[in-house]
Amino acid sequence: MTIKTKNIGFYLGYVFFLIGQLLGHTTIPVSNHIRYFFIWIGIICLLEQFINSFLHKAYMTNEFISKRVILFFILFLVISIISTIKSGQPIVIIDCLFILTAINVDFDKILKIFIITATTLLLFTMLCNALGLIQTIYVQRAGVVRNTFGYRFPTDFAQLIVYILLADLTLCMGHSQNILPRIIIYILLGFFTSFYSDARLGSGTIFLLIPAALILKYGKKLIKSTVLKWLEKYIFILCTIFSIFIMNKFISSSNGFLTALDEFTSYRLTNTRMGISFFGSTIFGQDIYSRINQFFRGWFYIDSSYYIFLLEYGIVLLILIEFGYIWSIKRCIKVKNYIIPFICMFVVLDSLIDQQFYLLEYNVFLLIPFANLNTIYSKNNEENSFNKSY
């Protein structure tokens, strides 16, 4: 894998950020000071590249830097700063910085860096756990023991595998590689995470990658169809509306189906209802976890990515993400990259009952808005003019 010198700051920054963040999801005895050191080094590398590129007018020479894009830059940055202050979640502004500084950075290389770094840490954590070098956490659900393999929660373990596989499938299809070995891996990992970690969401998503790979490989007409393109563009909004609808039904008149769904999803609906009751929606963000002891001392966590925005990060930031998502998918389709929009549908659907959507150490696809998306599907479209019509 060759890396252009001009983007080395971004790549190094992302590697250091991934190491610092992913270690925080494990039981590896690394102090927060060391983790924060890695993250700060990553941010410094990122800012160094941004300043260097700005001074050399590397951004201004790109035709896609329109007034609308500059306005989005400013709004996104300002709202992210406000949300970070009010929610007490630094990941919000860090995500913003990485998204805005990924201009013309090769997304294929970003995916490769994510896969290599995340997989290395995943295997290292599992090895340390197998050798008894780190604390082993076992979680029980309905009498079933769930192995975390050195991670703090089974979901953290399973979802990292999911995002690694999604990134790998994107590269696989973009470079017309063989899908048979991957289908075998999906089957093995699906059963492995289901049997040992009882990770129903993660395992289910892994199994769904089998038909996804087949469709991407052999269903070219389907992935280029008008209906699917429309769904890909607006699925984030549809899932947001669906989440709100389900929660309103659960709060107002919970029925047998919703009760069963709540139990099946480890009482995610109950926790979200508690969050709505305790805190309510927020315009610009609010710190809910430092205040939860005022209301409740039991197990509490918001797992729906959409309600994390509504209750914690802020409605305004959610609206910007909605517009940014639609714009990004339109851009992918414009340069004839039909793989990423299809893969992103799985991320969005997974986020209905999962909290990793706005965690960049998991969801590498957050970086698609301004990254270079050149693939075999877009060789005839120069990336530096992708946004002329926007």
Image (tube, rainbow, N blue to C red):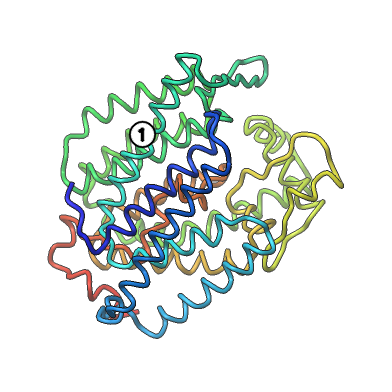
The number of discs equals: 1
Image coords of residue 386 (percent x, y): 26, 73
Q: Classify residue 71 as left or right of residue 117.
A: right
Image coords of residue 58 (percent x, y): 27, 76
Quadrant where the C terminus sits is bottom left
Nearer to the camera, 246 or 78: 78
Q: Classify residue 96 as left or right of residue 252.
A: left
Nearer to the camera, 30 or 323: 30
Which amino acid type is shown beneath numbered disc 1? Thr
Image coords of residue 254 (percent x, y): 76, 41
In the image, farthest residue toward the right? 294
What residue would you read off at disc 1?
119
Residue 65, quarter of picture: bottom left
The residue at 28%/45% (across/down) is 112
Q: Classify residue 248 as left or right of residue 210.
A: right
Mark 1 burial class by Cα count in 10 Å: few <14, some 14-19, many 20+: some
Residue 297, quarter of picture: top right
Q: Residue 195, relative to residue 262: is it above or below?
A: above
- SS assignment at label 1: helix
Nearer to the camera, 177 or 262: 177
Image coords of residue 275 (percent x, y): 75, 49
The residue at 49%/58% (across/down) is 95
In the image, farthest residue toward the bottom? 67
Q: Residue 178, relative to residue 228: is it above or below?
A: above
The residue at 58%/63% (across/down) is 318
